[in-house]
Amino acid sequence: MSKKIVFVRNYSDLSTDRGFQFEFFCDRCGSGYRTQFRPSVTGNIAGVMDTANNLLGGIFGAASTLSDRVHSAAWEKSHDEAFEGAVEQIKGDFKQCPRCQSWVCVEQCWNHKRGLCKECAPDLGVEMSAAQASRSVEEVWAHAKMSEEDKKLSESNWRKTIRASCPECGEPLATNAKFCPNCGTKLEDTNCPECGAKLQPKAKFCAECGHKI
């Protein structure tokens, strides 16, 4: 029975006719490891024969074709052995998450406490710190985008009535305006100069003290 070769999906094959080399990378962060180059004996022999054949004008044509076939079979066998050895060498540096099936690096992307990758089980301390930083950035941008009209809504005046439409003509108001842009009606509540009570728009007398406006 032929031997089965254990393989993973998170790798790149950098092998050539001259030898074997593989890169293994983390599905989450992209970092990884490259195995050392392992020369191919059959590749070197074939290279010597190709050079000799070229120098002698191709008189080894048939023999060269035969060597290619021998080299191909031997190279494939050596390639399988090299790949199997590379997987064995590197497997301690990666784990496959049982939840999402991703291959991740043990050093950066594996949550040892949870037995899952950090994509499925993030470090809570890191996430809390990131959330706080994100919230701070959102607040900075929100303040930066506030218009001058919006910035007037400070703690000292946020209780003032903000009208959505003019009480006189019904014109929609896009901003917290003092006067209606359509009919000129004063929109802000004013205070009685006598007692300080708030006056309704167009009031002729103060409803609190009767002072004539």
Image (spheres, rainbow, N blue to C red):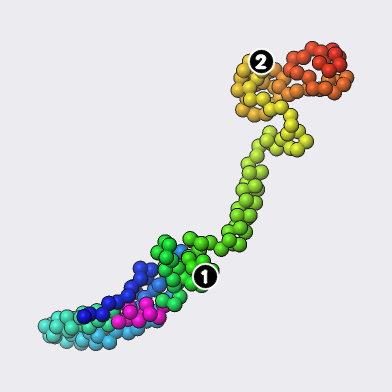
Q: Please name whichever residue, 211 or 44, is drawn nearer the observer in this view of the structure.
A: 211
The location of residue 44, given as percent across then percent down, is 27, 86
Q: Quadrant of the N terminus?
A: bottom left
Residue matched to label 2: 168
**Residue at (62, 17) in percent of width and height:** 170
Question: How many numbered marks appear?
Answer: 2
Magenta stretch contains residue 88: yes
> In the image, which residues are magenta?
81-90
Give the prevailing secondary structure in the magenta stretch: helix
Q: Does 60 sit above or below residue 207?
A: below
Dot 1, how many residues are within 10 Å of its Cα: few (below 14), some (14-19), or many (20+)? few
* 83 in relation to 97, above or below: below
Give the amino acid at mark 1.
His
Q: With respect to residue 135, does 199 lie above or below? A: above
The disc at residue 112 is: 1
| Quadrant (top left/top right/bottom left/bottom right) for the C terminus | top right
Q: Residue at x 62, y 51 (%)?
A: 135
Please determine whether, in this image, residue 205 is positioned above or below residue 89.
Answer: above
Q: Give me the C-alpha separation between circle 1 and circle 2.
A: 68 Å
Q: Earlier in the sequence, mark 1 or mark 2?
A: 1
The residue positioned 68% from the left and 35% from the top of the image is 150
**Viewer-side residue, 111 vs 161:** 111
Side of 179 relative to 19 (left or right): right
184 or 164, nearer to the observer: 164
Q: Is residue 132 left or right of residue 191?
A: left
Q: Is residue 13 magenta?
A: no
- Of circles 1 and 2, the one toward us is 1
